[in-house]
Amino acid sequence: MSAPYLIGRVIDPLYAVFIGAGAAAVRIRREEKEKGRDVSQSVESLKERMNILFEKDDVIPAGVPKVH
């Protein structure tokens, strides 16, 4: 029978999130390098994407008609 946890009940999920975030960062860095961008250009691109993602101007609650 195998152990129920690799490290511990609380630490296992934190470890998984850390490993996943690290893998995503490495992949993004590699893809941006292939596109010929440096770190500052990549950071600017990320800021633009985050601004688009979290813009609140066009958010309308459900059931409320959009009026222009």
Image: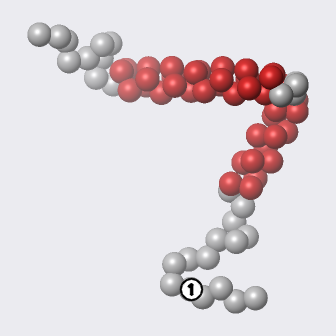
Closer-to-camera residue (31/58): 31
Number of numbered labels in the structure image: 1
Q: Which residue is pictured at 56% across the width and 77% down the height?
A: 61
Question: In the image, is 5 to the left or to the right of 1?
Answer: right
Question: In the image, is 32 to the left or to the right of 25?
Answer: right
Q: Quadrant of the N terminus?
A: top left
Q: Which residue is pictured at 80% across the width and 48% down the height?
A: 48
Write down the residue under mark 1: 64
Q: Quadrant of residue 45?
A: top right
Callout 1: few (<14), some (14-19), or many (20+) C-alpha neighbours within 10 Å? few
Q: Which residue is pictured at 37% across the width and 20% down the height?
A: 11
Q: Position of residue 17 (x, y in %)?
A: 48, 27
The image's colouring method is secondary structure
Q: Quadrant of the C terminus?
A: bottom right
Q: Position of residue 47 (x, y in %)?
A: 79, 43
Q: Amino acid at mark 1?
A: Val
Q: Position of residue 36 (x, y in %)?
A: 88, 25
Q: Which residue is pictured at 17% across the width and 10% down the height?
A: 2
Q: Is residue 3 above or below residue 47?
A: above
Q: Position of residue 15 (x, y in %)?
A: 44, 20
